Image: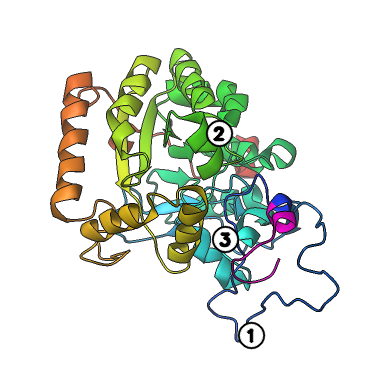
Amino acid sequence: MPDGGGYSLAQKAAIKGRGAISNHTPRFEREVVEAFDDGWGSLTEEMPSLRTTLTREAAKSALTYNDSPDLGFDRSINPYRGCEHGCVYCFARPSHAYLGLSPGLDFETRLMFKPDLPEILARELSRPGYQVRPVALGSNTDPYQPVERTEGLTRRVLEVLERFGHPVTIVTKSAGVLRDADLLARMARRKLVRVCLSITTLDPKLARAMEPRAASPMRRLEAVRALSSAGIPVAVLAAPMIPGINDAELERILEASARAGATSAGYVLLRLPLELRQIFEEWLNEHYPERAARVLALIRQTRGGKLYDARFSQRQTGEGAYAELLSQRFSLALRRLGLDRREGGTSRLDCGQFNPRADSRQLELL
C-alpha cells in the first residue's frame, strides 16, 4: 500500500476490516514511497483485499527481560510479531519498524512467528542459575490472535511452562484462550496461571472500528465467565482508556466484568509512542471527525500538552486533572464492586514448584 492518506474508495475497500488506514514508511527507512497517479487510473482502480502473511523467524531466545518500574513483571514471551487483531491504539505497533516494516497496515498483515520457541524456552529454563519469576505471555502482541488457531505456538509454550512448574500470566483479547481451558485449569489448581482479558468497550460498533479482528466484547465477557467457572483466576484490563472515545464506559466495563467472575481489574491510559500518534490521528479523523479535535485536546491535557509522555510512572496513567479523575473513578469502582478484595495478582502465583530438571534425561535413570 502507498504511504500516506488520501485513499480512494477502491483503496479503502481493500483495507476494510483492518485497523490502520495507512502504511507510512517506518522511521528507520531512508526512502519514502508515495502514491502517484500515472494517468492510467492507478489510484482509482479496484485493489485486492489485504491478506495476512506469516513468515518464519529464527528465535535466538524465548525470554525477553525488562527493568521497567511501570510493569509488574520482569520477563515475557511473545510467540508472534505483529498482530492481526488490528487494534488501532496498540502501543506495540512501532516495534514493527525494527523489521523494516510499517507500524500501520504491515503490523496487522505481515506477521512473524517463531516455530521453535517452545524448545528454546525449555533450554533456557533448564540452564543452571535460572531464577524463576512469573513470566508474561503476550505482553507485546496477542498470543491468541487468529493465526494461533493453526500454529498452536501458545499452547506449546504453555505445555512447557506446565511441565517445568513455571508461573505465567496471559494477556489477551481473544476468546480463543478457551481452547486451552483444560491445560489452564490444571495450572490454576497449582497456582501457576492467571489470565487477563482486555475489554476496551462494550459497544460492538466501536469495537469493530477500533479492534476489527478481535473477539466481540460479549465474547470476551463470556470467556471471563467460562474461565472463572473452570477455576481459572481472571483479571480484566479496561485498556486503553481513550479520552472522549471509551472513557465513559469505565465503570460499566468493570461492573460487567465483576458479574462475569473477574477476580481483579486494571486500566491504562491511551499511549501514543512514535508512529502510533499519526496512525491514531488518521483513524480518529476517519471514524470520528466531529470529535477528533476534542479527543486530541483531552489527550494533551493528560500528557503535559503533548500527545505522549514516555516518562516512567507517567506513561501508564498520565497526569493532570483528567488523568486524576479517571484514576479516582477506577479506584471507587474497584471498591464498590469488591474487585480490590478479590484474589489476584502475580504475587499469588507459586514459584516454589519450579523444576529446572523437568526435561533432564538423567531422571529416567533413577
Instruction: Give the total number of marks visible in the rendering.
Output: 3
Q: Amino acid at mark 2?
A: Ser
Which stretch is magenta?
Answer: 1-12
Query: Helix, strand or loop at disc 2?
Result: loop
- Of labels 1 and 3, the one closer to you: 1
In the rendered image, which residue does mark 2 sit on? 174
- Secondary structure beneath disc 3? loop
Q: Is residue 173 visible?
A: no
The picture quadrant where one finds residue 101 is bottom right
Q: Quadrant of the C terminus?
A: top right
Instruction: Give the residue pinned by disc 1.
Output: 31
The residue most toward the right is 40
As drawn, 131 above or below 258: below
Q: Nearer the viewer, residue 58 or 104?
A: 104
- Residue flagged by tag 1: what amino acid is it? Glu
**302 versus 34 height, above or below:** above
Q: Is residue 17 left or right of residue 177?
A: right
Q: Is residue 344 left or right of residue 274?
A: left
Q: Position of residue 181 (x, y in %)?
A: 56, 23
Residue under label 3, please give it: 61
Residue drawn 35% across the image and 46% down it: 242
Residue nearest the observer in this picture, 157 or 142? 142
Circle 1 — which element? loop
Mark 1 or mark 3: whose residue is earlier in sequence: 1
Which of the two discs, 1 and 2, sits closer to the camera? 1
Is-magenta flag for residue 232?
A: no
Residue 172 percent across, percent down from the top left: 50, 38
Location of residue 196 with respect to 318 vertically, above or below: above
